Amino acid sequence: MSQNLLHPEVLMAIVVACLITFFVTQWGMKRKKHATIVEKIEPVKTPVRTTDALTVFEQSLVILQSYKHNLNQYGYPYFKETTPFVLQQLQAEADSLVTEQARENQKAQNLLLDNITQLHRFMEQEVTDSKKLELEVSNHVNKTIITWRKLIKEFSNQ
């Protein structure tokens, strides 16, 4: 019986069966990973209007950190599917800041809107290399998080 297994046709059939099993399994795992991205999308929460720029920055920072984490975990498909929702949530946070009260609030709102504009540009950019775009977005988000952490420290020290 072991002599029958050593024929080239039998060995080739076993290799082909293993390859088919491997590729079907990989395809199924990618589909499952893609399905979990769609489940993570949350509806836009309307924040309460406030004059406290610190609170708005802290909430926006939480949104960006979650976005960064999921972008690093899921990559370009996450960027493509969820960036519009993240932009809506960040816009809602920026709109919740009352700017007439203090000049610092105007500066804060301008920074929030600049970030939204840049993310929107990334979203509208024509994609030739999805990995490169993913890295550019991740780099932008990292820089924004660092800047906003510094601003939060400034606001809390005042």
Image: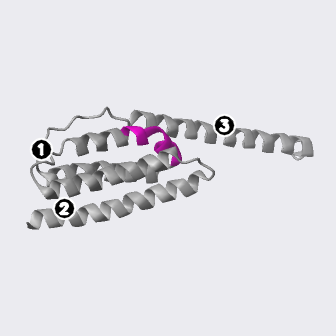
Picture quadrant where residue 3 is located: top right
Query: Hey, what amino acid is under mark 3?
Result: Val
Q: Which mark is residue 136?
A: none
Nearer the N terminus, badge 1 or badge 3? 3
Q: Is residue 148 left or right of residue 80?
A: left
Report x, y in % for residue 82.
Answer: 42, 40
Which residue is found at the position 42% from the left and 42% from the top?
Answer: 83
Q: Is residue 10 left or right of residue 96?
A: right
Whether residue 74 is visible: no
Query: Hey, what amino acid is under mark 2?
Result: Ile
Whether residue 10 appears in magenta in the rendering, the answer is no
Q: Give the residue at mark 3.
A: 24
Query: Hey, what amino acid is under mark 1?
Result: Thr
Rounded to the nearest angstrom, the CA distance separating label 1 from label 2 is 16 Å
Q: Is residue 130 left or right of residue 139?
A: right
The magenta-colored residue range is 76-85
Report x, y in % for residue 135.
Answer: 50, 59
Kindly indicate whether the residue at mark 2 contacts the one at mark 1 (C-beta within 8 angstroms): no
Residue nearest the viewer, comparing 11 with 113? 113
Picture quadrant where residue 142 is located: bottom left
Label 1 sits on a secondary structure element that is loop
Q: Give the residue at mark 2.
A: 152
Which residue is found at the position 25% from the left and 35% from the top?
Answer: 45
Which residue is found at the position 51% from the left and 44% from the top?
Answer: 124
Mark 2 or mark 3, whichever is nearer to me: 2
Q: Which mark is residue 50?
A: 1
Nearer the N terminus, badge 2 or badge 3? 3
